[in-house]
């Protein structure tokens, strides 16, 4: 039985064609559990399965690199999804999430832009603007990270980005097409939702921000041009993947002089909703140059529900808000109409049973995240995160409890996103409205045996 103290947080909600069993989601985080070539590892499968088994309704992956170009410029290690060969691991991932009763959302990234790091540090990172790497100072970094930067010169490499080059218009369009095709692969892998990756300083965000977009063509300059790329991408993915929920993660604002304002981002959210977005997921801040909002401190996270309320007034689709660890406050904020779904990453690092404990009336047993960011310090070093509060984080693959068995009744053999609506072919000849279905072959069939 669910605890009556949390009737709103534990109530179901619809996103597109799918219903979440409660309002608790795993927020996306680059948890560096993927393999060298972007393959989904068994540890990654077990990590997500653990949160699904813990009662979390919506499991959102960290950024999955959805283009070959983007995959060369990553944050440590990220999963890839642009080749049918990636479906084996991703299919295992979604099967585990569904087995334990969760819905699977793929956060698909077109690239990290000037926040990307390649294995060859002399390679120019593709971005909206040439010659504009990011530069971060210690006084703008979130609590705890200064320790690893102070001790490790190697980690300090993340404080300065690689030199950038400007993406051409033809390159942008090629990336958009590959991205849409990769989103179709994610649907085939069994994901129920696609989350377009557009927040805190990554490529799509860089096109939005006047601080990182200095272009003078159709993708730069005035606001309607700077939001062109993400608006087009929303249209393309909505068309390519009609059978799943499609949403966008964006920052609520940039919190720096001359940066994106909340009013501008609400205007963008309305554009995205008009183009078919089923949800808006709110992060905050401008990215690596100011991580206090990207990796929310308690003080920075406190104002996000207020931002959520402003977005919710302007939108009809559900609004997801991040970094609200206190279930009592999340319950009150949802009841007050400030947002619809509470997404957490580090809190679910610390206690993957968070949702189950609320449903079972054991809220006082929740292991609380201390926001010490030890998990991120390990990620910055390039290894799997661990947590002082949870000795199993990063080792879930070794716990037999998170393995799975025969298919359960609630699981579907065919991917629901494929069943709900047929996906169009994105490679058909331009002069055909659709690839024709040949009902009868023009030449008579001859099977084995003598000729007639």
Image: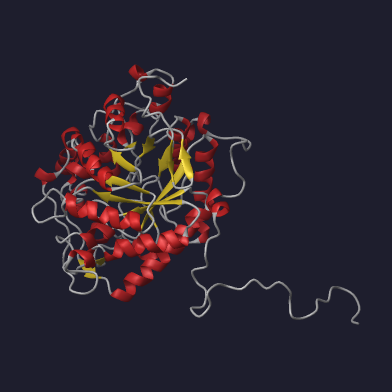
Q: Is residue 300 above or below residue 390?
A: below
The residue drawn where x is 32% and y is 46% is 281
Q: How many numbered discs?
A: 0
Nearer to me, 429 or 377: 429
Which color scheme does this rendered protein use?
secondary structure
With respect to residue 113, does 41 lie above or below? above
* Residue 212 showing in the rendered view: yes
Residue 208 lies, in percent from the top left, at 22, 60
In the rendered structure, the answer to whether residue 108 lies left or right of residue 409 reads left
Q: Which residue shows up at 54% across the image and 34% down it?
A: 403
Between 326 and 120, the one lying in front of the other is 326
Q: Which picture quadrant has residue 328?
A: top left
Taking depth in this image into account, of 449 and 384 the one nearest to the observer is 449
| Image quadrant where one finds the C terminus | bottom right
Residue 231, position as x, y percentages in the image: 31, 62
Q: Residue at x 9, y 43 (%)?
A: 139
* Residue 301 lies in quadrant: top left
**Residue 381 seen anywhere in this rendered image of the structure:** no
Q: Residue at x 36, y 29 (%)?
A: 9
Where does the image place residue 442, in percent across and percent down from the top left?
74, 80
The front one of 206 and 288 is: 206
Quadrant housing residue 346: top left
């Amino acid at each position: 039985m669910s605890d009556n103290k949390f009737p709103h947080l534990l109530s179901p909600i619809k996103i597109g064609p799918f219903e979440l069993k409660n309002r608790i989601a795993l927020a996306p985080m680059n948890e560096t559990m993927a393999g060298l070539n972007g393959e989904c590892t068994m540890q990654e499968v077990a990590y997500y399965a653990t949160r699904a088994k813990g009662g979390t309704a919506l499991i959102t992956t960290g950024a999955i690199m959805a283009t070959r170009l983007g995959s060369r410029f990553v944050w440590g290690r990220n999963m890839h999804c642009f080749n049918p060969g990636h479906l084996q691991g991703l299919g295992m991932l979604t099967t585990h999430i569904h087995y334990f009763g969760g819905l699977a959302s793929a956060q698909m990234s077109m690239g990290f832009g000037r926040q990307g790091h390649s294995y060859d540090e002399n390679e120019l990172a593709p971005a909206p603007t040439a010659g504009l790497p990011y530069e971060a100072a210690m006084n703008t970094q979130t609590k705890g990270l200064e320790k690893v930067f102070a001790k490790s010169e190697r980690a300090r490499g993340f404080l300065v980005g690689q030199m950038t080059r400007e993406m051409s218009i033809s390159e942008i369009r090629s990336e958009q097409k590959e991205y849409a095709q990769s989103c179709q692969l994610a649907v085939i892998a069994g994901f129920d939702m696609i989350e377009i990756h557009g927040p805190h300083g990554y490529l799509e965000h860089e096109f939005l921000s006047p601080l990182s977009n200095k272009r003078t063509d159709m993708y730069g300059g005035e606001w309607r041009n700077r939001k062109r790329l993400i608006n087009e991408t929303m249209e393309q993915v909505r068309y390519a993947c009609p059978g799943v929920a499609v949403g966008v993660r964006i920052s609520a604002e940039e919190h720096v002089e001359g940066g994106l304002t909340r009013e501008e981002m609400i205007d963008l959210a309305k554009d995205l909703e008009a183009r078919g977005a089923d949800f808006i997921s709110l992060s905050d801040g401008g990215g690596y140059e100011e991580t206090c909002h990207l990796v929310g401190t308690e003080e920075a996270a406190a104002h996000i529900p207020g931002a959520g309320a402003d977005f919710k007034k302007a939108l009809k689709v559900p609004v997801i808000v991040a970094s609200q660890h206190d279930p009592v406050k999340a319950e009150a904020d949802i009841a007050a109409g400030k947002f619809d779904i509470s997404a957490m990453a580090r809190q679910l690092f610390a206690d993957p049973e968070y949702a189950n404990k609320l449903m079972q009336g054991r809220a006082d047993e929740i292991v609380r995240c201390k926001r010490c960011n030890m998990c991120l310090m390990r990620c910055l070093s390039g290894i799997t995160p661990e947590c002082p509060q949870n000795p199993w984080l990063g080792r879930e693959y070794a716990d037999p409890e998170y393995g799975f068995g025969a298919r359960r009744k609630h699981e579907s053999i065919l991917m629901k996103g494929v069943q709900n609506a047929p996906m169009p072919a994105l490679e058909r000849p331009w002069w055909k409205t659709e690839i024709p279905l040949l009902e009868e072959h023009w030449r008579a069939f001859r099977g084995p045996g003598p000729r007639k």
